[in-house]
Amino acid sequence: MSEVSAGLRRVISVITARTGLHYYTDKPALLEKIVAARMSALGCRGYLDYLEHLDDEALGAAEWRELESAVTIGETFFFRYAEQFRALEATILPELLARLRGVRVLRIWSVGCSNGAEPYSLAIVLQQLLDRRGEDGWTIEILGTDISTRALEQARQAEFGWWALRDLTPRQRAEWFVPVVEGRTWRLKDCYRQMVRFRHANIMDLPHGRGPAGPFDLVLCRNVLIYFDPVQVARLVREMAQRMTAGGWMLVGHSEPMEHFESFMQPVRLPGTMAFRARAAADMPAGAPAQQRPMAALTGVAGLAGFAPLSSPIPCRPVRLSRPAPSFPTPMSSGPARNDPAGEAGREVEGSKAPDRKTPDRELQGRELPDRALQDRDAGSRDAGILRTIRQLADGGAPRRAVGMCREYLRRAPMAVGVYFMLGVLLLTLGEHEGAVEGFRRVIYLRRGHVMARCYLAHLLEGTGAAQEARRLRAQARELALCLSATHVLEGGGGLTAGGLLRILQDKENHDAGLLAALPDIASGLA
C-alpha cells in the first residue's frame, strides 16, 4: 500500500492508543486487512463509519473485543523457554515457597497468557514441587490475563493440539493430559486446570488504576512489551512492579527492552536467563504513590494485605507423579525442539488470523497443490498460504503429512525459502536431524543473510561433533545480527529480535537452551 488514507491513519491511531500495540504503526497494510474484515462483518461503509461503531455506547464494547482478538495472535506452547522453567523450578519457586511458608499463600500473574499454556505450565511445575517437598495446605492463585477474548475462551477449554504439546514426551502427555481426539487434541487434567483462573484485561489500563491489583509474588510478562514503544514500556514496568510484593520475582522474554526494568526492579542473573526482583517500598522511585507501591512492603506481610481475589482461593492438591518424574521437558532431551512465538505469544502479535484448530483433519488429508494456484498467485501469497496449511497439519497431529506437503511444494517451487525453513523445523521436532541439516543448509544457500537458519544449523552440527563449523556458523549469525537494528525482528525467529539473539549468544554456557527456546512459531513467524 503506497499511501495511507486519512481514515486508516485515524483507525490506526485509535487502535494503538487503546491497545498500546506500537507494532502496527509502521505496518498499515497488516492492520488495513484486519480492519477491512471487521468492517465487512459489520456492514460499515467506510473508516469513519467503523470509528463511530467503535465509539457507540451500546455496540462499541463488543466490537472492541472482536477487534482486539483479531489484532493479537497468542500462539504459544507448553514450557516455552526451557531455561526459564529450569530457573522457576530450581530457584524462583523454591525461594517463594520457603519465604511464604508461614502464610502458605502464593499468587502468580501471567500477563498476556494467550491460550493458557504458560499459566498451566506453571501449575504443573508448582504441583510437582509441592509433591516432592511433601507440603500441603497451600492456597494457590494463578491468574492469566489477556486482551483477546478468543484466546481466553481457548484457555478455559484447556484443549491443545500436538504442536502446543510438542516438547512433551509421551509419558508427560499421558500424566498431565487426557486425549480428546486420539493423536490430535488433548485436554489438561482438572487437577491442574483448577489452579488457574482467567480474566480479560488490557495491560494499557494499568496506569489508570484498572486491572489486577495484586500484590503478586511472581509475574510472567514474556513477549508482551516488545510490541510497545519505549515510553509505554517504562510506564508499564513501573505499574507491574507496584503490583508485586517486596522481593517478588518477574520473568520477561529474551527480546524485551530490559533497560527499562532496572529503575524499578533488581536484575538477577540465573543460568540461561535474566530475572528481576521487586524492590522494597523505600527503594521505589519517588513518584510512585504510596497506595500503589507493593502492599507487602507497606504492611510487612507478604502476599496478603489489600488483596481482593478475583475468585475464591483454590487449595492446591498436588498430583503424585510416577517416579522418576521428569522435572519438565527440555529441548536438549530426546523430545522435539521448541519454537518461540505464541506465539508465541507469552503472546505474539501478527497481522494474520490464527489457524482454526477445529478444521477437520479429513479436509486437509490428501490435499493436492493445484498447478493453477501456482500460476495465478504471486510467490509470496503462495508461500504464505501453504505455510498456513502445513501449520494446520502439524497442529492437527499430522507432522509427517506436513513434511510431505513441504517436500511436494518444494518440488514445484524450489526457491521457497520459508518452506525450506519450515521443513527444517518440522524435521528437527521429529528428531530427523540429517534432513533438518539439509533443510537449513538450503535456506542459507538461497538467502545468505538468514540469521536463524545459521543458529539452528550450528546447534544440529554441534550435536554431530562438527564443533568447528558450528562455531563458525554462530560467529556468522552474530556478525549478521550486529549489522541489524537491535529491534529488528529476525526472519523465522518467531518474534525474536536481533538484540535478543545477541543477548542469548553472549551467554556461552547456555546458548543452546536459549536458541532452542527461540525456535520460531510457524503460524506467526513464517506464515
Image (cartoon, rainbow, N blue to C red):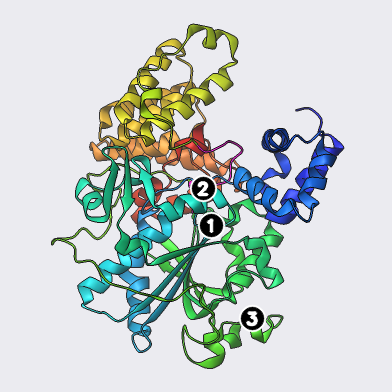
Q: Specify the amino acid type for callout 1.
A: Gly
Asked whether 352 falls inside the magenta stretch, the response is: yes
**Secondary structure beneath disc 3?**
helix
Q: Residues within 10 Å of mark 1 (few under 14, many from 20)?
A: many
Which picture quadrant has residue 469? Answer: top left
Label 3 near label 2: C-beta < 8 Å?
Answer: no
* Range of magenta residues: 342-354
Which residue position is annotated with label 1? Answer: 112
Residue positioned 40% across, 46% down in the render: 515
Q: Which residue is mark 3?
A: 292
Residue 444 image point, x, y percent: 44, 27
Check if mark 1's residue and mark 2's residue have beta carbons within 8 Å. yes
Q: Is residue 313 left or right of residue 318?
A: right
- Residue type, numbered disc 3: Gln
**Which kind of residue does numbered mark 2 sit on?**
Gly
Q: CA distance from mark 1 to mark 2?
A: 8 Å
